[in-house]
Image (spheres, coloured by chain):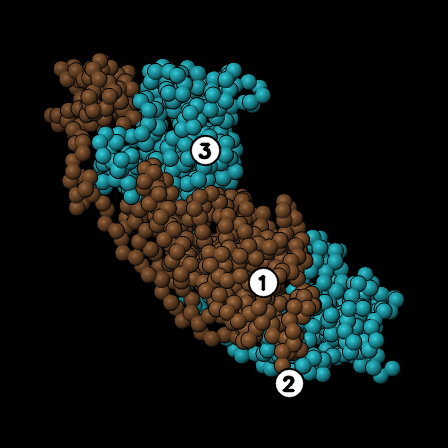
Chain colours: A brown, B cyan
Amino acid sequence: MAQPRPEVIVTEALCKGCGRCVDACPKHAIHLGTEINQVSGLMPVHIDHDVCNDCGLCMSACPEPYGLSTELYELEDPKKLYGENARRPKPATIPPRKIALPKVEPLVLKGNYASAIGAILAGCRHVFGYPITPSTEGAELMAKLQPKLHGVFLQACSEVATINHMYGTGGAGLPTMTFTSSPGFSLMLEGISYMIGTQLPGVIVNVMRPGPGLGYIGPEQSDIKLMCRGLGHGNTHAIVLAPTSPQEMLDLTFEAFALSFKYRNPVIIAADGFLGQITGRVTLPDHLIDPGLPDWAVFGDAAHRGNLNSSIFQDWVDLEKHNELLCEKYALMQANEQRSTGYRLDGARTLVIACNTPARTAKAAVERLRREGRPAGLFQPVSLWPFPIKALQQQLETVKRVVVVEASAGQLEDEMRLALHHADAPKVEIHHLRHMGGILPNDQEIYEMVRGLTEVEQ
Amino acid sequence: MSGTPAKTGAAFFEHFDRHAHGKGLKGGTTHYCPGCGHGLAHKYLAEAIVELGVEDRTVMVSPVGCAVFLFYYFDTGNTQAAHGRAPAVALGHKFANPNSIVVSYQGDGDLASIGLAEIMHAAQLGVPISVIFINNAIYGMTGGQMAPTTLMGQWSSTTPEGRGPMQGQPMHVSEVIAKLDGASYVERCALFGQKERKRAKTAIKKALQMQVEGRGFSFVEILAECPTHWGLSPQDSEAHVRDVLSKVFPLGIVKDEVREPWFNPGKPTFDAEKVLEVIDAQREPVKRFCTKFPTHLDPLDVSVKLAGSGGDGAQTAAMLLTRAAIAEGYDATHIPSYGPESRGGTSYADVHVAKDEVLSPSAPAPHVLVAFNAPSLEKFSMSVRPGGIVIYDSGMISKPPEVQAGVRVLAVPCASIAQKLGAVVVKNVVALGALQEATRLLDEKTFLGELDRSLKHKTNLIPLNEAAFREGAKAVRELKAS
């Protein structure tokens, strides 16, 4: 004797009355309803249990998970909604591990290569990218090295796809990165907004080139505005770090991964075309990172089964709360991650403010001015967002004027002015030296400009 | 997370956290309209996941469109992707954990319009992910606009007169995907009638099974009903798929290739020794030959410009010089500047060698210029600072340069010397030999050691390069003597 089949039941409040089960029933035991259900406001179907033989075909025709079933679904069982077992247990975070790196001779690396090696040492084994001058060497080196470490380099079909591959891998809780340049960075902005909204880590190395439009392939600091103020739609910010040498390309990329996981937010390395291409001496850190796995990862295993990566909040109150949480993270970044450095700041009366390659040419100019007894100094923001306003304000207590030197139409100066304004800083005399199109401010012109502003002091 | 965990042996949450935090009806029903095909596709997907026992390994990628809230229902790992990008996100997950079972669930607007690039790339790549493509020939969530699969003559809010020739033809997505080499399994199914529903369920399960076995990219298109935007009853919608839609989009297997399991990227390594080997880091200290910084050139920082046309080897020579200087413990930089052409364009390199730190890496007024062709020599010879040196390839350039007072000019026939050695390509190494001899910038042995290191994988070329370097140096000695 076959086991008797369980009885098929309509949970009336969950039935939308579409009637797909009506045609599916070989016994014609189901009929469209005629009475409105008081809970759902819809008309559930009716099963004639005298005719039904519980064959179950109706269930496989019902688009609702619990509309037709062999057991009655309990609506709003408080225990199920809010009870102790209402959630899968949160997995333990597997913390990243430092692995000692034996001392080696300094490497001689192009900036893009140095950044790639920084990422490898930070534990990044998933790199996605799309070729674009002047950042492409990063992708090329990753294509060569990652397979040897059982890592992945995937050449994406576009920058749009690239950032979404990163959304997937970053969402799985692993370090991931890309190399791009300005037009490619523009294309990634929607995905970056999604990563920020979903709170996912990832490192984007943007080797900036001139625009607008195609522009060309030389160096410019064309995307400071985008990176600091325009990361796609919505309430977005990310830490933006600006290196000045291959060594800093490595060091800052290495550090970017830790920051990215610390804040669950993308981190951007802002390089210029010169920095991507320049070769220099690079010393490796004393350790590398085995990245571990965070508790929130959607990794695709039993431990992380209950996790979700999404930036959707259907309830407006929830979405506002989510944005407030993001704002709290931004405030933490502003409090903890302001970075800057300087050169000959002691007693400086004129402060040259520059980042990336212009900071190096400015350094040469400052050195020359100092040799003449002119008290010039260089203040170099390392984090462009958050702008290192605390350190700058300290300097402003003694300097008479600042000269912002940049390869853009004033994007760095705008960041500085905004930061000064928010900090209610006293007014300071602001001059600037700017170039665009691939021309970098050179040390001679910086020297000449600052010399004209700065008296010799005995 | 989005609900009360599924019971053992189920892939749907037992209770959904959707609107109003799952209070009321919404905890038990989907957000789909009555009669919508999505619910059935969800159900068969959930059943397939359970039957294959992959509940714990599955990551569902939900699209933008009506299925955007897929994560409310599936008690699996969940990711919500930007519009059209679900296959790219799915690949990110699959590479992160090759053992995960990744499903990209997309509608016709998401997959066949805004996301065409991503789906084509994923299908051509062939990495084992599964794509469930819901084709209801209309944009549902935005309220009934034309989809790429909207039928000719079909009304939508953006084809108010019916889809006409100006709006193009309905896209046969499965056939397009099947043409791509990476796709292993492609089938189009429908949801009208018990037989088609059973086939749809079997197809979805097979798509996942292929991924479980690591065989390849699988794609199931499901012709689904949209009673709301078709303006038809659920019953008439089923009939519409049967009588109209499936005539334009024929049902059945479009492609089914048996492939051996191949996807196995391996486990990433973080072993320090392995990483050092892969990045070519050198453990043994490099021998140094210089006893003091070349202060006869500059107290702190010597700049060299090497210039020629693309292919002259200016960049390679600059790189060798930079490496050699760093091997001696100095700071050095090399910055190239070249046109977009790989060969034949302009190619200039600025090198700095500094005692402690290179400040500005460009060389607008170099101490030394090495020029391989006439335009480069003409462009830069006047920029060489007084006390500096110009070396030019006199085999290629007949006219001596104009220089500032106090600049030494050396005519070295680099190309001719290299040609005599049997390989004109080493003319840049000849130039380096000349540079060292003329400037005493480093030590001859530094360069020879650097040549050995850079040619360690092509050792047969070392004698030629060493000879080129020595001949360059000799040519300068002979010039001095004469």
Q: In the image, residue B476 lies at what x, y percent? A: 80, 78
The amino acid sitting under disc 2 is Lys
Observer-nearest of B328 and B287: B328
Q: Indicate the quadrant where residue A247 lies.
A: bottom right
User: What residue is disc 2 on?
Assistant: B292
Q: Subunit of mark 1?
A: A
Badge 1: residue crowd in 10 Å (few <14, some 14–19, many ≥20) = few
Quarter of the figure that contains the N terminus of chain B: top left
The amino acid sitting under disc 1 is Glu
Q: Is residue A254 visible?
A: no
Q: In the image, residue B137 lies at what x, y percent? A: 45, 23
Height in image: A110 above or below B263?
A: below
Q: Subunit of mark 2?
A: B
Height in image: B407 above or below B67?
A: below
Q: Is residue A48 visible?
A: yes
User: What residue is disc 1 on?
Assistant: A429
Q: Residue at x 52, y 15 (%)?
A: B161
- Relative to residue A443, is residue A292 drawn left or right? left
